[in-house]
Image (cartoon, rainbow, N blue to C red):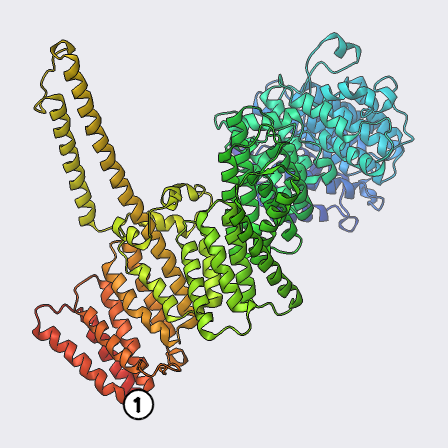
Amino acid sequence: MSQNAGSKKRRREPYNVDVKLVEIYEDLANEKEDIRLKAAHKLVSRFTPEANPTADEAQKALQRLFRGLSSGRKAARIGFSIALTEVLSQVFSPSKSEELAELSVTKVIDIWESSTKVAGSERGQEHRDHHFGRLFGAEAIIKSSILFQDSEFEQWLRVLSLIFDLGKKKPWLREECGWILYRAIYELASQKIHAKYTESIVEGICSNELAKTPEGVAVWLAVKDLFPTATLPSNVWKCDDPLDRHDRKTLSKVMKESSAADETAETEGLAKKSSGVWNSKLHFAWDAVLARLYDSEATDKKSKGPRLDFSDFWIEVVDNGLFAAASSDERKYWGFLVFMKILNEAPSQLAGQIFTKNLVRCLMNQMADKERYLNRMAVKAAKTIQTRVVKEPEFAAAAAGGLMGTSGSVNFDQLTKSNTVEKIVVEAGPEALKSIIDLLAGFITVPGTEETNAAASIRNYISRLFVSTVKPRSSAGGEFQPLLEEILFVLVRFAYFADETAKPSLSQATQELFRNKINLCLSSLVSSNKDPAGVAYAVVRQIRNLQNSNEHGKFIIDMDDTISESVDTAFKSLKKLSSKVKHDEDQKDPSIQAFRLLYSLTILEVYNGDADAVSMLDELAFCYTKFWGDKKSKKEDKSDASNALVEILLSFASKPSQLFRRMSEQVFGVFAEQITADGLQSLISVLEVKENLAGQQEMFDKQDDEDEEMPDADEDSDEDSDADSVEVIDADEAENDESEEDEGEDEEELAAFDAKLAEALGTNGDNQDIDSDADMNDDEMEAVDEMLVKVFKARRQAITKKKDKKDAKETMTNFKNRVLDLLQVYIKKCHSSMLALDLILPLLQLTRRSTVDQISQKAGNVLAEYTSLCKRNGIPTLSKNDGDEEHDPVQAVWELLRSVHKEATIQHRQKHSAAVSQASLLLVRVLVAQDRQNIAQVIDIYAETQKTQMLSKNGHFKSGFFADWNAWCVNFGKNSKR
């Protein structure tokens, strides 16, 4: 029997198995979409009228396709569903062949029902596969449109019945069943099918108690919109509309899938059963509802109709529903999905309404703690806000107001440990930024708390936010320019005036902080803005105007008559300079702009209480008179003015402020070509001073308040990370032997302190027991107290002295850094000037002598840049000054070359040796450019230096010094022969 069966099977195989068809079915389950689509196309082509298929072939294909829908392998359901839809369309097309007449729609539904029926012996996954097969089959049948004929209405009802049965029996498939019906309504509308089809869907929804479910709401809205003449069941929704105002509470319960079976729910007919399964994806009903709310707002803005408006819907359904305090994390998760959905797609006027109290509270709570269940979701929501602002900068006003306003907290960023608001403000468009500035100014005036420290913290944050707003826009100009000035004006209002509207009043520390923030803002604008002088002038002019008007309270800076007179004179000069700019708008004189900037910032320093700034104003008045005031000023007078200007810039450079560093560089660059030898010597003298306490005392006539203010003057350096903070840190990078010496001093000081303490206590310093107070009388105890006071006073003095040394080193290091910055500006502008040669020896000596590695390296870099610029046309030309017959510039260069070679004999680090070689060759190029015959004497000098190397014990040379010289000689020889 078995043999016969086997042979029989072998005889049938060649006749009944269609290998190509088997391959097609196999490819329909392929995970690659293009392969599935090709297979579907091949299968469908077999059932076109041209292919003349038989009913039997079609039935077998349909059976195979329906069975394939119940397969869980690979992508079978997707591929088979696509093929099934198209095959049904071809088999029942109007131009179908007569051979297919035997196959009816009823037969197809029978095949679908039987192929996806669950057998009693099946369990678990097989059960689920058949349920999915029925679901996908229903979708394919409806999409094929074979039911949309009057003759097939009974089969339509049959399909609906099977879909409703599936949704009721398997709640976890209810949403998918609802989606199929929802899309069917749109398919019916596109083909203009009779309304009875959609009416039957709604009747089925109601009869199966699904009307007040998310699926029911979506279906009802679709039918109501697409089939306005359809007859809908009464007494389901008030006014037959789920979005009617009277049904808002019911709608809220439906959309959050409430399962509360209270009396209200029963009387309103609310479904007592939810879908039974929580889905991490947002229900499609939200798309249906939100789309109609968007349309209602767009078409009916003025009149308030019976339907809910967007704001009422959001508050009732989302804020008081999904984000209610008692809501579960799962519903809040849905709430965040709705929030992000609206942010991504809603018009800005609607998206701006969703920053409501419960939402923002939940957002802050979840973002504040990484251990929270919804932390990642909240962070994602915050990033969605930022993304919307990037795409639509004007949305920033609504976003910032929503997060910081009455619904949120002005401390949103601090509470959530994020920079969400900061990023929003940074991306704001012009109109939005204007609103945000007003909002933040209001928070400074009324922070929302009467507690002093809390108010100070809020105001501190707002000021930092202003700085963050200015920095990225410092070079923007255009529409942003007046807004940046407005930010500065807000800071001015609270930094320099006792504004009576501020509750609580601003502390002195906060006002000083605001003044520092003004400097930080100006620092960014000075370095990047197209009109830095105009911005600085606007700030001091605003201070003066408010001082005269008392609009925002009393001016808090005390100025006597002398200071006020100097400021008045300065403003008169500033006004004249500004008028020069207006009259010459197209060709602005850079020197005028530089002087405007210098004048404005000096006045600002006077307003900040800097005593030295007043004397600088007088010096500036002298400079102004010599440069612009007196057309008959002698050349010597202008030289004096130039020297005075250098001293003023040095005063600014000595201040640990980025603003003054950038300003001094800009102004110095403009006037660099007018700098005299005396002015240059003022800069050089700073480099020659040691980086210690003695050097500081030598540099400054006395230790004034600047030394004490230095640590506080740049208290926001962490906010404005730049070269300043780096330079101060690098001041501690001294030689190893110095640090070891400090450690030795610490040990000696500690030992001396222990000895004095032991002497005062009358012990030998060991762990000797001390008797009770009864062993001493009052006089002895008083004497011991006096001794202890002296010992600890001496200790404090020692600690203070050590701190003074450290502070002095930082001060001088910072000062030298600033001077080197100025010299770098000078050589870029004036490297071809003969005067610049005076910098070579001081820079070499600084490279060798400095105890701070960073200073030594920077000096070498400045010199290297100088030598690199002095090539070809950039080589300084040696010529005598008019009226100076005694000074021979050529002889001075020869002496300078010998001094450089003397530097070469001093043993030091590699950086110094390289700098010496570069400087020497620069001077050689200068001398040879002046007279080619000078090469002979240059060779003699190098020969003398090499003789010193060979014969003197004190001559220390690196090999590169003479190697560089030899290489230069080779190049010189080649060029001479050309």
Viewer-closest of 61 and 555: 555
Residue 100 visible somewhere in the drawing: yes
Find the residue positioned furthest to the front.
561
The percent position of residue 797, horizontal first and vertical second, equals 24, 35
Q: Residues within 10 Å of mark 1 (few under 14, many from 20)?
A: few
Image quadrant assignment for residue 709:
top left
Viewer-closest of 485 and 51: 485
Image quadrant assignment for residue 281:
top right
- Number of numbered discs on residues: 1
For residue 763, side relative to residue 808 (left or right)? left
Image quadrant assignment for residue 158:
top right
User: Residue at the location (54% across, 47% down)?
Assistant: 561
For residue 213, side relative to residue 21 (left or right)? right
The percent position of residue 952, horizontal first and vertical second, equals 8, 72
Viewer-closest of 909 and 938: 938
User: Residue at the location (20% across, 69% down)?
Assistant: 903
Residue 69 visible somewhere in the drawing: no
Find the residue positioned furthest to the right.
229
The percent position of residue 354, horizontal first and vertical second, equals 69, 31
The percent position of residue 431, horizontal first and vertical second, equals 69, 46
For residue 879, side relative to residue 392 (left or right)? left
As drawn, 671 above or below 452: below
* Residue that badge 1 annotates: 976
Viewer-closest of 915 and 704: 704
As drawn, 777 above or below 875: above
Q: Quick one: SS at disc 1?
A: helix
Find the residue positioned furthest to the bottom.
977
Residue type highlighted by circle 1: Ser
As drawn, 144 above or below 168: below
For residue 52, side relative to residue 432 (left or right)? right
Quadrant into which the C terminus falls: bottom left
